[in-house]
Image (cartoon, helix red, strand yellow):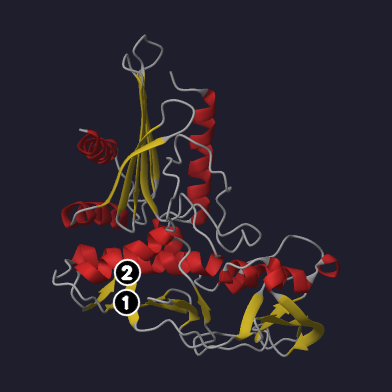
Amino acid sequence: MVSMMHKSWIVLLVTMVLALGACMPVTPTAQTSPLSEPAAEGTPTPAAEATEAPTEEATEEATAEATVEATQEPAAETGSEDVDMGALVRQILAQQLQLNLDQVEIVSVEKVEWPDACLGVYTADMMCAQVITPGYLVILSVDGQQYEYHTNLDGNFVQLATAPEANIGDVLIDWQQTLDTCQSAQFGRDGVVFGPCMGVRMGGKLVSSERENELADFVATYAPFESETPAGIVTFNGAGSTEATPAEQRMIAEWARQAALEASAGRSGASWGLAFAWHREGGIAGFCDDLTVYVTGQLFASSCKGQTAQTISSRRMSAEELEQVYTWIDTYSPFEYIHDDGPVADSMEVRMVFSGAGSTQADEPTQQEIVAFASALYAQEVR
């Protein structure tokens, strides 16, 4: 039988997924399913989670709409006079650079009146209301290099105005996507730069060794290409010989979008970039199984028996599997699926949270088809 705790967590997950809109980060290090365990980090968007390491509930659409510019993260909801703006901005920079707070020096904090709603920081595609906007000029220093930030009064809008030029080595992936504004990122062997396409960009690092390994694997496997995908325009400078299929090209674009979002927030989250999470529990055999699939192409199968989840398998999906997953994501809107055999001795419950970005509501047969696909993937991993 499925515990009330599990049921309450699935409701929470669905609520968070829908709130995010649908989208992406995820470099899970502890491969637990969002359906079988509560999200330890809370799952907000990277912007809302400036004090942790970054936002969580990344479903496919969430990454699409999340800004790559972490400096636009909202601050804590306090009155403007109560905000320690130097400390707030210091936290943002330390998080993005993955440093301890004591490695970031507050040089100065000055109260100013900005000439417009953009706080005096402009990009070519930004519209600015021409109204005087009170706020702060904050200057920070890391290893003698200065970063200038402009904020409004309560710190819920923070703009990076100047930053040291980043050196990431040869560009391996160049990515950009235009939603309300154009955001971009470039990835090299020595780091990543991210921010508005025609504005000041921040230099940083990939948030985990897993991301570094994935980048190295992409470069070693695939030949160079340029492609326009639903996840953005990507120029890939690979050294491999395999010609990437359209689904694999999109996978690399999804990976770049997710990695840029993570870099901007300074961390990853176990539900970022979630395509779907499948959970099965109960039966005479006492099943407790989880499968999580991400838009970045990663698949994780685990067992939730016992006190802690155990990863059984993790891999990158095949081109054919990716093509099917992307087709569903682009077509169908998010849904929650629950099948419960009821109060019988060998009761089995199967649940799925699907993070689609489409506009079509999946009917029951379609939901069952996606659930069966997930079940088959899991069976393939454990046999």
From the top left corner, tell me how far across and down residue 192 is, in percent.
Answer: 45, 76
Relative vertical location of residue 294 with respect to residue 166 in this rendering, above or below: above
- Inspect this view and state whether residue 201 appears: yes
**Tag 1: Cα neighbours inside 10 Å, few (<14), some, or many (≥20)?**
some
From the top left corner, tell me how far across and down residue 29 is, in percent.
Answer: 44, 50
Quarter residue 45 falls in: bottom right
Toward the right, the furthest residue is: 81
**Tag 2: Cα neighbours inside 10 Å, few (<14), some, or many (≥20)?**
many
Return the disc, 1 or 2, that comes first in the chain's sequence: 1
Quarter residue 117 falls in: bottom right
Toward the top, the furthest residue is: 345
Three-letter amino acid code of the residue under disc 1:
Ile
Give the side of residue 381 with respect to residue 349, left or right.
left
From the top left corner, tell me how far across and down residue 68 is, in percent.
Answer: 49, 72
Give the side of residue 317 with respect to residue 200, left or right.
left
Residue 215 numbered tag: none
Q: Residue at x 14, y 69 (%)?
A: 242
Q: Residue at x 72, y 61 (%)?
A: 76
Q: Which residue is mark 2?
A: 253
From the top left corner, tell me how far across and down residue 276 is, in percent.
Answer: 36, 46
The answer to whether the residue labelled 1 contacts the one labelled 2, judged by CB atoms less than 8 Å apart, is: yes
Q: Residue at x 35, y 84 (%)?
A: 170
